[in-house]
């Protein structure tokens, strides 16, 4: 008897129906009829969730046919609305006694007692509800619930592939195509319009039904076996630093992969007639939907581990390696990822990337650092974006506001397209400025340099028209790597940088790790309470001289036959410069002994980031060939205000009288001693603050390459002598209660300086 009916037969019939050339409505009608017959139910109905959060009856066997496309329930209303909202099935022998029961007179359903409804789910989202009803009071068996869920999955595919779109009426589109916006955080400025590329593409399972369950169960078992082996293998690898979080995640994977409940649900789905792939998708989707309602953050976190695991299993089953990227990528790709490693982003061809969306991450995540270097807008903390997005959906990343708009309405898209055009026009203006001298309106030259740190930054040197690299943050190579970069890799990067600079000056800063710049493979075991004030930068490298020696040697070798500029970060005492110099001198002697080609000149500079240097400026200037103000750190230490603390982000202003006086003191000391002074913190990159710096006497500033255009546009209109007089006067007067930012912007306004 079970052979005549039962889930297997139903799935076979559904497969036949899907293959027939039917109109969508006809197909739905036949599907519900088939389900009703198979389940020996008098009623089978399908409700589909619309974008306005209403569930509309799309097909029925047994209820009044006239109510199709008329009967509707709000999300959360009645039994059907409850199932959709909770993403859980309801199995009731007497539906009318359920507190949520809502009677829809147009359907004529009052005579039915038993009720089984399951959500139609895809990737954890509810797309509709599938219901069977009987007159008698019966309880549906577990395997019947299972069969309904499997059938619902087939319907989910129909909805997701757009099969039902032709049945919608204008203004009443399906939920799947609904425009959604997310607010999170801005990780990198810029606006990108394009199409979604899911970083870990949801593998589309097209083959839903198996021919032979026994054989399919064996395939599943074998894939599960390989999955477990690959996890064990990763856990036992010693070459990669799988410590801390990495290890914890993998251990969780191993636990899940051996979870009896998970494996049993997969086997059940296969026994019911699904392919192993479809079974993985079904179980994953059910689980996601249920977990979404959990409030325990730990469990919700674990869900993404489970997702990853299911994706791995799917890949095992389908014999797929990582997707071949370039061939399938749209020209305006916006990559949407839960999280991502920095190296993975570099796998995408830069010329097709328009933006990056991350569900997790922080401004300091490595992938974000790389994205910033690549100049693509990044929006982060976009919880839920991955499950709402489908490959190919239109999407806008607003890196300025920290928002994304998925499937945007035409007016939103038009507004953003205008914004992008505006930005492009400005870029065009900046490009024109590139060949013009970087000189004030009254004829003073100012060097505009760029900050860099990775090979991907190098093309920007020509594109931005920078006069050189004022700060090369060598620690970035260390931060995006899985282990300490070997000496050869360091040397290669430094050589590439100098080659790309074609004789323009490059200032390499020795590694500035510690503080917020952590290397996963290099743990500071002392658990510092104030890492920004802790064991970092020069303090760390002087204590671990092998690190510094290796880097200096790589720099010296790479600079053979040309000038080398080395800058020391976080100098506090002059003695640190002497100690670093000793190490450098020893390396020079070592290379000379082995007849290596040495740099034609070697200049050693110090960063001014620690306020203690302000009271030893003369001595400092005499001890180095140049200095560079790290205004990010100097400001945080002068103001005692953590640079990463959002609560303090707008509280103190670097353009305030006291900090401007500090900056002036430094540039004056440089002038007196004849030591070149640069400034390379974020302050240099905003036109208004760059204007102030130039007015104080700075003739060399280094910034992100994207800032060079706007700063140059300001510079070429700047009446410097007037500004100098204005600032000298402003800083000689008491600062209390004054708003220097407003005064500077009024000056710019009066003098036609574009900020
Ligand atoms: C600074 O502190 O201003 C600086 C340029 O260094 P970093 O931002 O890398 O700390
Ligand atoms: Mg710094």
Image (spheres, rainbow, N blue to C red):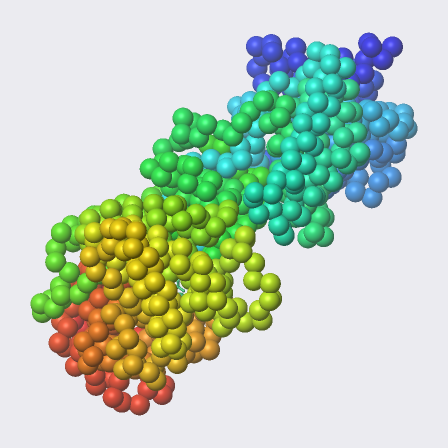
On screen, residue 153 versus residue 610, left or right, reads: right
Q: Which residue is at a point 44% across and 48% down the rendered structure image?
A: 485
* Rendered image quadrant of residue 524: bottom right
154, above or below 473, in the image? above
Residue found at the very far left of the displayed protein: 443
Above or below, 56 against 384 in this view is above
Of 604 and 357, which appears nearest the observer?
604
Residue 50 is situated, as x and y percent measured from the top left of the image, at 59, 35
Which quadrant is the N terminus positioned in?
top right
User: Is residue 317 shown to the viewer in this render?
Assistant: yes
Q: Does 168 appear above or below 254?
A: above
Where does residue 275 sit, x and y in percent of width and height? Answer: 68, 19
- Residue 282 visible to the viewer: no
The quadrant of the rendering that contains the C terminus is: bottom left
Report the side of 286 relative to 669 (left or right).
right
Q: Quadrant of ligand 2?
A: bottom left
Please count the marks in the image: 0
Residue lying farthest to the right in this orientation: 137
Q: Nearer the viewer, residue 231 or 449?
A: 231
Residue at left 30%, top 51%?
594
Residue drawn at the location 81% of the way across and 16% of the way down: 6
| Viewer-side residue, 160 vs 647 | 647
The answer to which of 698 and 543 lies nearer the viewer is 543
Give residue 571's quadrant in the image. Answer: bottom left
Is the residue 569 above or below the residue 411 in the image?
A: below
Q: Position of residue 572 (x, y in %)?
A: 40, 76
Question: Residue 194 location, x and y as percent?
Answer: 40, 38
Q: Residue at x 63, y 52 (%)?
A: 244
Residue farthest to the bottom, as pictured: 734
């Amino acid at each position: 008897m079970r052979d005549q009916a039962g889930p297997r037969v139903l799935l076979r019939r559904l497969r036949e129906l899907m293959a027939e050339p039917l109109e969508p409505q006809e197909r739905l009608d036949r599907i519900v009829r088939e389900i009703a017959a198979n389940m020996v139910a008098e009623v089978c109905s399908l409700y589909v969730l619309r974008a306005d959060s209403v569930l509309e009856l799309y097909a029925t066997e047994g209820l009044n046919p006239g109510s199709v496309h008329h009967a509707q329930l709000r999300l959360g209303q009645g039994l059907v609305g409850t199932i959709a909202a909770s993403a859980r099935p309801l199995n009731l022998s007497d539906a009318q006694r359920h507190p949520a029961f809502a009677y829809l007179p147009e359907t004529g359903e009052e005579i039915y007692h038993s009720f089984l409804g399951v959500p139609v789910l895809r990737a954890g989202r509810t797309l509709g509800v599938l219901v069977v009803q009987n007159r008698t009071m019966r309880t549906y068996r577990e395997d019947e619930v299972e069969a309904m869920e499997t059938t619902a999955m087939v319907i989910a595919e129909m909805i997701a592939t757009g099969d039902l779109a032709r049945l919608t009426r204008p203004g009443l589109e399906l939920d799947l195509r609904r425009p959604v916006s997310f607010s999170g955080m801005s990780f990198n400025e810029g606006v990108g319009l394009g199409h979604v590329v899911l970083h870990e593409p949801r593998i589309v399972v097209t083959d839903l039904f198996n021919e032979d369950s026994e054989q399919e169960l064996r395939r599943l078992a074998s894939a599960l076996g390989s999955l477990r082996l690959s996890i064990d293998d990763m856990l036992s690898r010693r070459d990669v630093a799988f410590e801390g979080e990495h290890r914890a995640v993998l251990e969780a994977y191993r636990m899940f992969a051996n979870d009896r409940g998970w494996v049993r649900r997969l086997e059940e789905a296969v026994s019911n007639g699904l392919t192993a792939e479809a079974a993985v998708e079904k179980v994953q989707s059910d689980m996601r939907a249920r977990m979404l309602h959990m409030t325990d953050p730990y469990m919700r976190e674990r869900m993404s581990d489970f997702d990853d695991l299911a994706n791995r299993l799917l890949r095992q089953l389908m014999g797929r390696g990582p997707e071949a990227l370039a061939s399938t990528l749209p020209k305006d790709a916006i990559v949407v990822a839960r999280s991502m490693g920095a190296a993975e982003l570099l796998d995408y061809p830069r010329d097709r990337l328009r933006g990056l969306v991350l569900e997790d991450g922080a401004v300091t995540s490595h992938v974000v650092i790389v994205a910033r270097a690549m100049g693509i807008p990044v929006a982060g903390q976009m919880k839920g974006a991955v499950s709402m997005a489908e490959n190919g959906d239109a999407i806008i990343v607003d890196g300025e506001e920290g928002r994304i708009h998925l499937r945007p309405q035409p007016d939103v898209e038009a507004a953003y397209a205008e914004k992008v055009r505006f930005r492009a026009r400005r870029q065009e203006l900046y490009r024109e400025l590139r060949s013009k001298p970087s000189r004030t309106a009254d004829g003073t030259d100012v060097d505009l340099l760029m900050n860099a740190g990775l090979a991907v930054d190098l093309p920007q040197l020509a594109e931005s028209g920078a006069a050189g690299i004022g700060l090369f943050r060598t620690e970035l190579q260390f931060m995006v790597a899985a282990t300490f970069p070997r000496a050869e890799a360091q040397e290669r990067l430094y050589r590439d940088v100098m080659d790309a600079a074609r004789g323009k000056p490059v200032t390499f800063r020795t590694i500035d790790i510690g503080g917020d710049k952590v290397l996963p493979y290099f743990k500071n075991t002392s658990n510092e309470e104030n890492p920004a004030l802790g064991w970092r930068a020069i303090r760390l490298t002087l204590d671990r001289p092998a690190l510094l020696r290796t880097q200096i040697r790589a720099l010296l070798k790479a600079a053979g036959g040309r000038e080398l500029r080395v800058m020391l970060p976080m100098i506090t005492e002059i003695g640190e410069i002497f100690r670093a110099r000793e190490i450098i001198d020893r390396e020079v002697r070592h290379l000379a002994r082995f007849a290596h080609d040495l740099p034609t000149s070697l200049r050693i500079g110090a960063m001014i980031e620690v306020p203690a240097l302000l009271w030893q400026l003369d001595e400092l200037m005499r001890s180095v060939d140049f200095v560079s103000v790290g205004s990010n750190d100097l400001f945080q230490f002068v103001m005692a205000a953590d640079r990463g603390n959002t609560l303090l982000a707008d509280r103190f202003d670097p353009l305030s009288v006291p900090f401007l006086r500090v900056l002036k003191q430094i540039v004056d000391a440089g002038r007196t001693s004849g030591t070149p002074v640069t400034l390379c913190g974020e302050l240099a990159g905003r036109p208004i603050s760059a204007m102030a710096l130039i007015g104080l006497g700075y003739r060399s500033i280094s910034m992100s390459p994207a800032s060079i255009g706007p700063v140059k546009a300001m510079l070429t209109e700047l009446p410097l002598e007037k500004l100098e007089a204005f600032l000298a006067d402003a800083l000689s007067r008491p600062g209390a209660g004054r708003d220097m930012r407003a005064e500077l912007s009024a000056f710019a306004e009066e003098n036609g300086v574009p900020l």
